[in-house]
Amino acid sequence: DIQMTQSPFSLSASVGDRVTITCRASQSVASFLNWYQQKPGKAPKLLIYGASSLQSGVPSRFSGSGSGTDFTLTISGLQPEDFATYFCQQSNTTPFTFGPGTTVDT
Amino acid sequence: DVYLVESGGGVVQPGESLRLSCEASGFAFSSYEMNWIRQAPGKGLEWISYISSSGRTIYYADSVKGRFTISRDNAKSSVFLQMNSLRAEDTAIYYCARVRPCSSSSCYTTEYWGQGTLVTVSS
């Protein structure tokens, strides 16, 4: 199985900050990397697919980059509604494994 | 709008069975692949099963292979998860999710999620 790791485990940030979360795969997943946002008690929401494509309806302050094994999610100008947990997931090879999550709080 | 509504969760004892259902609306269900994904309380996300739009291609995570069966009824816009021989470690919120159409840079991406149904396995 492909193992997904994320760093940091959690981070504290303020409104307006630029936030960067890193995801690493144990082997290449090409560009088959997705990012999700989850708020407490809610289902996850797709933000980025194909490593860098913005899902429809997602604000442009969210961006993704990377390929192969190393990926980044960036939030440019953190907004109050962005405090949440973020997960990466590879959809290149079954099982489609998720990273452990990164919690962004104040 | 895309709607996915799961049902069938509940409390069962180890070794028992449960069948989850997910009713879809707001899109052409028969054209979309579907996933089941679960999340143990306070834990991360675990993909557990995939079914193609026709139902002919199915994948499972090793943790559920041989115990869980995914199926779909396109006439009823529904996907199901039959769960047998349940264990305490199967306790989780189970999400039904629609898969984004495959492209050159993205396949098997979970695009829309239901609200989830809680399965508790406890003696």
Image (spheres, grey):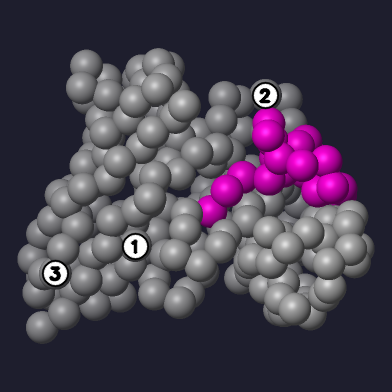
User: What residue is shown at x 34% (from left), y 53% (from top)?
Assistant: B116
Residue type highlighted by circle 3: Val
- Is B98 on the left or on the right of B9, as rendered? right
Give the mark nearest the N terminus, 2 or 1: 1
User: What residue is shown at x 42% (from left), y 20% (from top)?
Assistant: B27
Return the chain for callout 3.
Answer: B
In the structure shown, which secondary structural element does the residue marked by tag 3 occupy?
strand
Q: Is residue B110 magenta?
A: no
User: Label 1: which residue?
Assistant: B93
- Is A58 on the left or on the right of B22, as rendered? right
User: Residue A68, image x and y in percent?
Assistant: 82, 49
Residue closest to the eye, B1 or B68: B1
Quarter of the image holding residue A71?
Answer: bottom right
Q: Which disc is residue B11 wearing?
A: 3
Residue type highlighted by circle 1: Ile
- Give the vertical position of A33 relative to A72 (above or below): above
User: What residue is shown at x 55% (from left), y 38% (from top)?
Assistant: B111
User: Label 2: which residue?
Assistant: B103
Give, as a single range, the part of the protein colored magenta. Answer: A44-68
Q: Marks 1/3: CA distance?
A: 12 Å
User: Residue A59, image x and y in percent?
Assistant: 77, 42
Residue type highlighted by circle 2: Ser
- Give the vertical position of B8 relative to B76 (above or below): below
